Image (spheres, grey):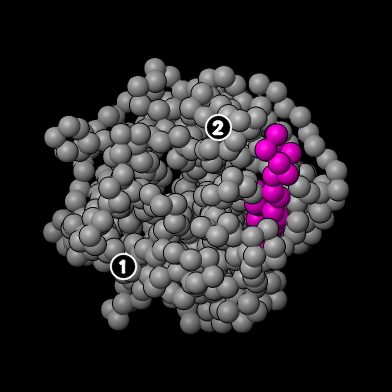
Amino acid sequence: MTRRSVRGAGAAVADSAREGGELVAVVVPEPRDAVPLVALQPPGAEVAVVCLRAGEKGDRAALDDALASATDRGCRVAGGARVLGADGSEVAAALLDEVRDLEPDRVHTLDPDPVHVAFDQESGMPSYAVPAAQAETAAETLAAARALQRETGRPVSVDCHRAGSDPQFGAVAGRRYPLAGNWLSAGFDGRLTAFLPTAAGLVRRFQRVPGGGWSGPELVEGGGLAPGLLVVPDPAGLPHLFALRRTARGDGGVDVEIVHAAQYRTSDPPTPWQSLGAPNAGDWRKGREVGFPAAAFDAAGNLFVFARNFGHSISYLCRAADGTVTPWRHLGGTRVADELVAVSTPYGGVEVYGRGRDRAGVVRWCTGPDGQWAEDPRPPFAPRPGTLAPAAEPGAVLFRDLRTNEACVWGPGAPRPCPLGEADGAGPVTGVPGVELDGWPYTVLLRQGPDGRCAVGAHPEGRPDTGVWWQDLPMASYGPPAAALSRRGLLAVAAGAPGGRLLVAERRGPGGLDLTAPQLV
């Protein structure tokens, strides 16, 4: 496996996007809550911390140390923590004033719907290991970021993290809404569409003509969407969109449900969001904890949607090709974390993988010859949190090894994972199949390096064991980069930039993976 770096005219564009940096606002109740979120910030980010209260002296010192460490690794710290001193009914207005003053590109906060640690069967009340102020602050922060985006029209990204994060991997292990991977899609007409989750909901951008100019950020109708997104192609290659929607209740609670939309033509907006409900929907206190959905289509066009339920096992429903929808059904079995990945298999079915909650490793669910679901609790690999993703090849999954961080791929029947090289960097690896190189089909992979720069790799389709040739690209990405292949065989690679902008590069010709200089659009 080899690697080479490519720098040229496009590097200046990428560097200018990086130098502009993201302004990241970390919004939490107290200084101690900000420490793990500050540790997530990459080099180049400008970090501002907003706390509702001043907290204890020792916690303030711990935050000062975290900010100093961020400066040492290349972040720009916008002074010490801003303390609002607000409480009760004053919080919403104070937070909105603060985000208006900062105008952040990205907001990091806590989980508005925390996970229970115990449940009283008699009263029907869950209990939590975190104070209620954390969820309340997260909900108010989401509302403030949403209001700012609607006022300015400038997309604001939001990341929500669970408190009490994994001691080895920090807050990244507790990400409430996973990073979108396959967010770039090519339509029948060859035009690209980028789907971006934001504070105010789903934003999309699309090419006005193939290879031409891009539309400005366009907010897709649908209120109450959480800032996460899953994009899944159907058998025809059309993008289907999945998200969580939070709706306030009159009794002070909140309903959280899974919603689905689809885009059938690049120039037309997606369909209206359709509710798919959620596991445990009969009790809002249980239902609000639903995990982020995973979804895949089988060869007949049936859509399977999976989610982690209140009991931390997997539930699913099926929307048949004729439009009929089953109730939510529980699979049970091994308890799983929030990360689920559904894949379409080579034989035309669907399988789902989940990262284990109580042990390292994954669980796999598949259907047997009788159509019944069966659990495979011991696939031979353990992924790092936040890295499990569908592979380009049917039925396989991509991930970073728990111990080594190396990118790997595994499919059922393989005795062990196949390493793909490159143990630096973070986040999921994504890819597209069917890219023709010198007359042969190849799978193209994308990943982020340790400094946020993108790298592209390739291996013969279905043969990752032959080795991956990695090439650094002169473009950085805020979040995982994405690739799309048009029906005419044109490959495009895109990366996120601050303010809802994109860096887009396209393949020059069929002879290799030589890409055009990235354009900031």
Q: Quadrant of residue 350?
A: top left
Question: Which quadrant is home to the C terminus?
Answer: bottom right
Which mark identifies residue 275? 1
Question: Given the current orientation, which residue lies at the most extreme top position?
Answer: 415
Residue sitting at 31 percent across and 72 percent down?
253
Looking at marks 2 and 1 on the same chain, the residue that comes earlier in the sequence is marked by 1
Where residue 7 appears, as percent x and y from the top left, is 83, 40
Residue sitting at 20 percent across and 48 percent down?
330
Where residue 126 appears, as percent x and y from the top left, is 26, 58
Amino acid on which the number 2 mark rests in the picture: Pro
Q: Give whichever of 160, 90 is nearer the camera.
A: 160
Which span of residues is magenta-colored?
493-514
What residue does disc 2 label? 441
* Residue 371 sits above or below residue 245 on the image: above
Q: Which secondary structure, mark 1?
A: strand
Q: Is residue 14 visible?
A: yes
- The number of numbered discs placed on residues in the rendered structure image is 2
Q: Give whichever of 108, 493 is nearer the camera.
A: 493
Front position among marks 2 and 1: 2
Q: Is disc 2 surrounded by few (<14), some (14 to 19) or many (20+) residues within 10 Å?
A: some
Q: Quadrant of residue 28?
A: bottom right
Where residue 414 appears, as percent x and y from the top left, is 39, 20
Which mark identifies residue 369? none
Q: Is residue 286 visible?
A: no
Residue sitting at 39 percent across and 65 percent down?
261
* Residue 277 sits above or below residue 450 on the image: below
Where residue 460 appears, as percent x and y from the top left, is 56, 27
User: Relative to 35, is 70 on the left or the right?
Assistant: right
